[in-house]
Image (tube, rainbow, N blue to C red):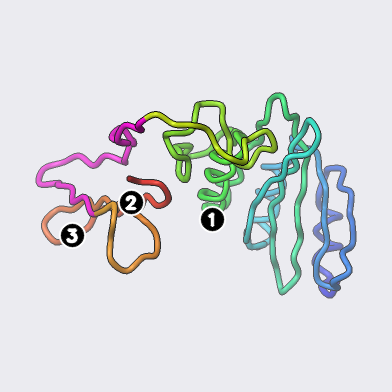
Amino acid sequence: MKADWTTDFLNQLSMDISVAQHNAPSSAVWQIESRHWQRFAELACGQQLRWSAGWAEQLAGEFQVNACFEKQGVYIVLRTIIDGAKPELPSQATVYPAANRSERHTQDMFGIRFTGHPDNRKWTRHQAWSKHSYPLRKDFLVQGEPQDITPPDMDYPFIKAHGAGVYEIPVGPVHAGIIEPGHFRFQAVGELILNLEERLGYVH
């Protein structure tokens, strides 16, 4: 590792960490117990590490969940293992807002529940998929499943705005300037935009 902060940071962590050095001089894998997942994020934020990516992989009877942190050009891949029968993990989005969409995507594709997540609505999950069907799990049929006619996705819980003079402008699902379908929900008072919520992925 090319930065001294990693050694100091490791010494400050009151948790068991397995450190695996990558071939690259500026990256490493740190493995921790799942119960420390959120606490690590809190400590990393305090040390000004940037949350840069998150992903998961299904193994035999369990899931491997990863989050990548960066500081001064050094990348730390934080890794943990969770039970495949009850795939739950504390959310890091409460500390790093950048983790929000990644955790929601992992929830939609793998069925991993991030407890305490500030916004656990589906994101990239198509409503035609059955309740316990997750496309990136190894038991998901390669050829897919025969589907009946899928009803319109009319019940997505957009954030609500209330107050005198507040109105909503729905735009989409097809919108010029992006490369995928998208629904944009503007909430405004006069010309002042109070909130813009984007819903991408399957929105037809």
Query: Chief secondary structure of the magenta span?
Result: loop
Closer-to-camera residue (181/48): 181
Indicate whether residue 86 is drawn in magenta: no
Where is residue 13? Give x, y as percent: 81, 49
Where is residue 28? Give x, y as percent: 83, 62
Separation of marks 1 and 2 at Cα, in angstroms:
15 Å
At a point 55% along the width and 34% down the height, the residue shown is 116
Vertical side of 179 occupied by 188: above or below: above
Q: Which residue is mark 1?
A: 98
Where is residue 113? Give x, y as percent: 59, 33
Where is residue 14? Give x, y as percent: 83, 44
Label 2 sits on a secondary structure element that is strand
Q: Which of the marked residues, 1 or 2, is nearer the chain's N terminus?
A: 1
For residue 81, what is the image quadrant?
Answer: top right
At a point 77% along the width and 33% down the height, the residue shown is 62
Q: Nearer the viewer, mark 3 or mark 2?
A: 2
The residue segment tinted magenta is 149-171
Residue 178 shown left or right of residue 116 in the figure: left
Q: Which residue is mark 2?
A: 197
Closer-to-camera residue (177/130): 130
Q: Which residue is mark 3?
A: 192
Label 1 sits on a secondary structure element that is loop
At a point 45% along the width and 38% down the height, the residue shown is 122
Closer-to-camera residue (185/62): 62
For residue 138, what is the image quadrant?
Answer: top right
Q: Across the whole image, how many numbered discs are drawn on residues?
A: 3
